[in-house]
Amino acid sequence: MISLRNVTLAYPNGVRALEAVTLEIGKGEFVFLVGHSGTGKTSLLRLLYREMFPTGGEIVVDGIRVDRLRHARVPALRRHLGVVFQDFKLLGDKTVWENVAFAMQVTGAHTRDIMRQVPRTLDLVGLAHKSRMFPGELSGGEQQRTAIARALVNNPKLLLCDEPSGNLDPTNTTEIMELLQRINLKGTTIVVATHNQAVVDRMRRRVIRLEDGRVVADEERGYYYLGLGQSKVLSG
Amino acid sequence: MQATAIGTVAVTVALLGAFVFVRVTLAGLGTQILDQIEISVYMKADATPSQVAAARSALARDPRVASVEHVSRAAGLAQLRQETRGVIDMSIISANFLPEKLRVRAKNLDNVPAIAASIGKIRGVDNVVYNPPVVQRLLQLGTVMRRIGIAVIAIFVLVAGIIISNTIRLTVFARRREIAIMQLVGATNFYIRLPFICEGFLDGILGSALAVVVLAIVKTAVWQRLLEALPWAALGSARFDAPLLALELLVVGGALGIVASWISVGRYLRA
């Protein structure tokens, strides 16, 4: 599904976000990307949906050479994957329904397809009863679920989540992660960048740790503090 | 902000329209003036056809003369009716008081006075009329004004374009969050552009429409007065297609709007 080979990313100001990163993520996997803020997790995700362009290396997403993609073809790429952000990025003047439908409208979908798919997706995330409300009227967890619904409505094979629980309290966080697991069970590949130790340790999925832009650990049923022995219980 | 854009387009297009109108009118005037650079030879009222013919062939033989044209009294009357149509009611004149006329064009304008003098000696010729250099100056003025006019119009179009462009840029900036989300979700650049292009187009069309209305009002108010004040100028003889000009102005405004907004959105999307 995703393949990075020797990928390097240097920002114009000289900061080297990623250094010779090589990894593979298969279809249907659920992967945590962990590391301190600024170690390159977000940058890596950004490369995957072509928000940024790598300085070197090869990136393949679902068979497409993303690093070689022409600028004009980037929108097409993005329609085949879903992205979820820490700050939700919803349109405040549109209802939940409209926000989700928006992702279908920009791809030129037929109204009848939209009418069929949007309710289904809202059902999946458990927001069918709130489809007429505006983001401002929802809790953080509900807003994130709306964002997830929007990311899913075009049936992407890959879902990228950049600190999805960053703005949420523990209860909401649990809800969201359970939702993501359910989605993963249906076959969608999911990559979650996070620094939420509790979540990572609880779920015991594949964990890839980045430090200073390099992959320092990669384990199947991992813990947050990989490669440092057993999971560390931090005081406080 | 929107009003500024529309207003600037209105001013630009109004100027353009006025310019075209003046040009067309001047062109009509110019033809008349050109006529007057010719030497007009008026035969006496009792001149015989053979005298007219003789005068004509004498002039045709003159090496300084480029062409001679005979304007019969009937033809002359018809032309006069045409030129003063709408201003003077010619139907009240029944008798043709016009003389036989010869239009003589000289090869070289410097020879005109000499030719005129020699014509005066031909039998049957009553009056020889030609116009002094003032006319020359008028023609030169026309050309100069045309060039200045084009430069002024170009500047105004540029200014209008810039203002529309900035207006659109402000709108784009105000909606940058929405645009970012659209890009994230996979909207093509064209899809994102479209509403802004439409807005620019509307600004342009509305501005032009405003200009057309203002021009129409001014023209109606001023035209009749002008015709009466300068009947000699035969301003009515310039054929002028008002609806076509209005349409052309609308097109110019719309095009200006589209181009300006396309450029300004494009700059944002690429940045």
Image: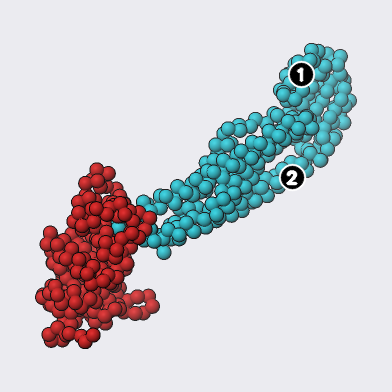
Chain colours: A red, B cyan
> Residue A213 sits in which quadrant?
bottom left
Mark 2 residue crowding within 10 angstroms, few (<14) / some (14–19) / many (20+): few
| Front tag of 1 and 2 | 1
Give the Cα separation between the discs numbered 1 and 2: 33 Å
Identify residue type, mark 1: Met
The chain carrying label 1 is B
| The furthest residue to the right | B121
- A110 versus A235 height, above or below: above
Q: Residue at x 38, y 55 (%)?
A: A93
Residue for badge 2: B141
> Residue B182 sits in which quadrant?
bottom left
In the rendered image, residue A215, in percent from the top left (x then y), is placed at 20, 79
Lateral position of residue B185 relative to residue B196, left or right: left
Lateral position of residue A40 relative to residue B39, left or right: left
The chain carrying label 2 is B
Q: Residue at x 72, y 24 (%)?
A: B86
Lateral position of residue B159 relative to residue A32, left or right: right
> Is residue A132 or residue A13 the one in the foreground?
A132
In the rendered image, residue A181, in percent from the top left (x then y), is placed at 15, 65
Question: In which quadrant will I find the N terminus of chain B?
Answer: bottom right
Lateral position of residue B5 relative to residue A197, left or right: right
Q: Residue at x 64, y 36 (%)?
A: B216
Mark 1 residue crowding within 10 angstroms, few (<14) / some (14–19) / many (20+): some
In the rendered image, residue A108, in percent from the top left (x then y), is placed at 29, 48
Residue for badge 1: B90
Q: Residue at x 20, y 78 (%)?
A: A197
In the rendered image, residue A156, in percent from the top left (x then y), is placed at 20, 58
Q: Is residue B124 visible?
A: yes
Identify residue type, mark 2: Leu
